[in-house]
């Protein structure tokens, strides 16, 4: 995101220390720590992520990291903000606001899928770093430009985050189990589910049996696009009624 960078006031829930003009003699910077930590996370996942592991990658001690970022949670907050900053949000085009919101969601999903376990890190975190604030500003601007009332714009923005995170969490969980050999690949697994549901007792599961073949549909891209259509169409209808 390329907005002009300004010093913003510290947000609530701040876990990263404010150092002001104080500098250490070591060559580390917060930026280098965050970029290295993100590489470690992408490569090893959350289970293999630690302050010690990041310090080793930087050829330094963990104490140096703590001085810059405060804690492991503080570093994870910074990683989240870094990933949010990778996402480009276009300038509002009122006549295209619905498609722009879909593009925002598509970009969000592809960014999450590019970074291992990042959606798991997002659970329980309130993103209020500078990138997150600017991201919120730009997405809300699209919604308001499209005529979405203010309260609905905020609520739908927060729900959009939840919807995309939930979808990608399911994707990431299934992919992790597939890599571990615990479940078959998506297409094969979906076919197995469809066959199984179709074999259930007809007297107890008549509706499930009738639609069993549709459970074998493994088109995740199509499913995500349907989710976006349902979400944005419903939002547009509610905005018109407001």
Image: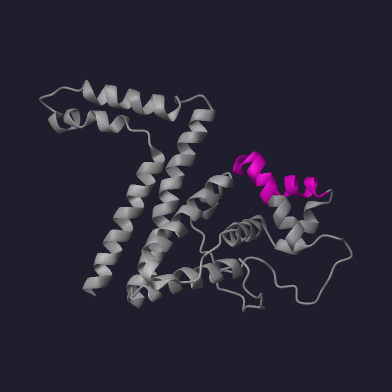
Q: Where is the C terminus found, in terms of image quarters?
A: bottom left
Q: Is residue 195 visible?
A: yes
Relative to 159, is 215 on the left or the right?
A: left
Colour setting: one colour
Which residue is at a point 29% across and 26% down the rendered structure image? Answer: 194
Q: Which span of residues is magenta-colored?
A: 38-58
Q: Is residue 201 above or below residue 29?
A: above
| Residue 143: quarter of image | bottom left
Expressed as whole percent of the image width and height from the top left, the position of residue 63 reads 79, 56
In this view, the residue farthest toward the front is 95
Q: Is residue 120 visible?
A: no
Q: Where is the N terminus found, in terms of image quarters?
A: bottom right
- Camera-nearest residue between 186 and 147: 147
Q: Is residue 43 above or below residue 25?
A: above
- Camera-nearest residue between 55 and 105: 105
Relative to 25, is 38 on the left or the right?
A: left
Expressed as whole percent of the image width and height from the top left, the position of residue 14 reads 60, 69
Count the numbered circles shown: 0
Q: Main secondary structure of the magenta part?
A: helix
Q: Is residue 79 above or below residue 96?
A: above
Q: Is residue 42 magenta?
A: yes
Q: Is residue 78 magenta?
A: no
Q: Is residue 230 above or below residue 185?
A: below
Which residue is at a point 32% across and 57% down the rendered structure image? Answer: 231
């Amino acid at each position: 995101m390329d907005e002009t960078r300004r010093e913003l006031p510290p947000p609530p829930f701040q876990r990263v220390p404010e150092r002001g003009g104080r500098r250490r003699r070591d060559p580390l910077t917060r930026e280098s720590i965050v970029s290295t930590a993100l590489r470690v996370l992408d490569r090893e996942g959350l289970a293999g992520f630690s302050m010690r592991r990041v310090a080793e990658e930087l050829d330094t001690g963990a104490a140096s990291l703590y001085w810059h970022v405060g804690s492991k949670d503080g570093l994870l907050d910074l990683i989240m903000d870094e990933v949010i900053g990778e996402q480009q949000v276009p300038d509002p085009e009122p006549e295209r606001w619905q498609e722009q919101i879909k593009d925002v969601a598509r970009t969000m999903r592809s960014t999450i899928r590019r970074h291992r376990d990042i959606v798991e890190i997002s659970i329980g975190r309130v993103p209020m770093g500078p990138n997150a604030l600017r991201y919120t500003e730009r997405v809300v601007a699209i919604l308001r430009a499209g005529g979405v009332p203010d309260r609905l714009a905020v609520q739908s923005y927060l729900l959009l985050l939840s919807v995309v995170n939930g979808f990608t969490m399911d994707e990431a969980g299934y992919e992790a189990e597939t890599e571990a050999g615990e479940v078959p690949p998506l297409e094969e697994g979906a076919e197995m589910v469809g066959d199984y549901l179709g074999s259930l007792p007809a007297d107890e599961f008549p509706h499930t049996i009738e639609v069993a073949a549709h459970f074998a549909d493994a088109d995740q891209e199509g499913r995500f696009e349907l989710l976006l259509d349902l979400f944005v169409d419903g939002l547009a209808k509610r905005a018109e009624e407001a």
